Image: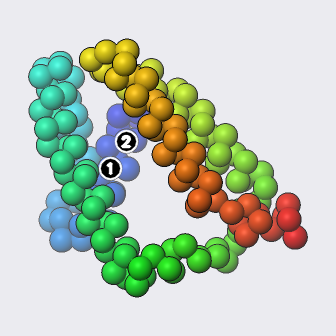
Amino acid sequence: MTWISLNADIFARLIKTTFPWWPIGIPITAVIVILIWMQSAIRGYKGLEFISFIGVPSALIMSLVGVVAAFNVTNGFSMITTYTPENPLSFTAATASIVGGWVFGATITPDVCRFAKSKRDVIIASLVAFIVGCLARNNSLDFRRNCRVCFS
């Protein structure tokens, strides 16, 4: 198994789970996903541009639909913001999650930033991502509620 096949399998399962009406099985969907990704590698930046032309608007639309659906199902996000898990994270799991997120971000940033048009774009994107990431983590992660081992 390779990295690309694992990602294609995960992506195919995501498609099948998200869209139950999807008529194609997971193995064939994974092959289709690999072929789409492969065309971007074959065509270089033109292929990447093609994938981005389709992928970015699709991701934005699906994200918006997901937010609206969550808002409608939870009557204004109150169920989401007051959710208490049945099995809270241990201190170790919570710490690993946060450190892992930072490590992933530090690792992937140079890979993504190489496509920026200027150093200025990299700095602006990094600052925005850092601020949004910090605000999202600080507002959504309540250690006292989610980490019973440490604060009980």
Q: Which residue is mark 2?
A: 7
Give the residue displayed 12% in from the left and 32% down from the top: 50
- Type of the residue with mark 2: Asn
Up/down of 140 relative to 34, above or below: below
Q: Nearer the viewer, residue 67 or 91?
A: 67
Picture coordinates of residue 67 (x, y %)?
34, 67
Report which residue position mark 1 lands on: 11
- Mark 1: secondary structure: helix
Query: How far apart are labels 2 and 1 at the CA level?
Result: 6 Å
Which residue lies at the image location 34% right of the left edge and 23% below the top edge? 121
Given the image, on which type of amino acid does mark 1 rest?
Phe
Q: Position of residue 19 (x, y in %)?
A: 24, 67
* Residue 2 appearing in the image: no
Residue 29 numbered tag: none
Q: Secondary structure at mark 2?
A: helix
Q: Quadrant of the N terminus?
A: top left
Q: Marks 2 and 1: CB-CB under 8 Å?
A: yes
Quick check: 129 left or right of 8?
Answer: right
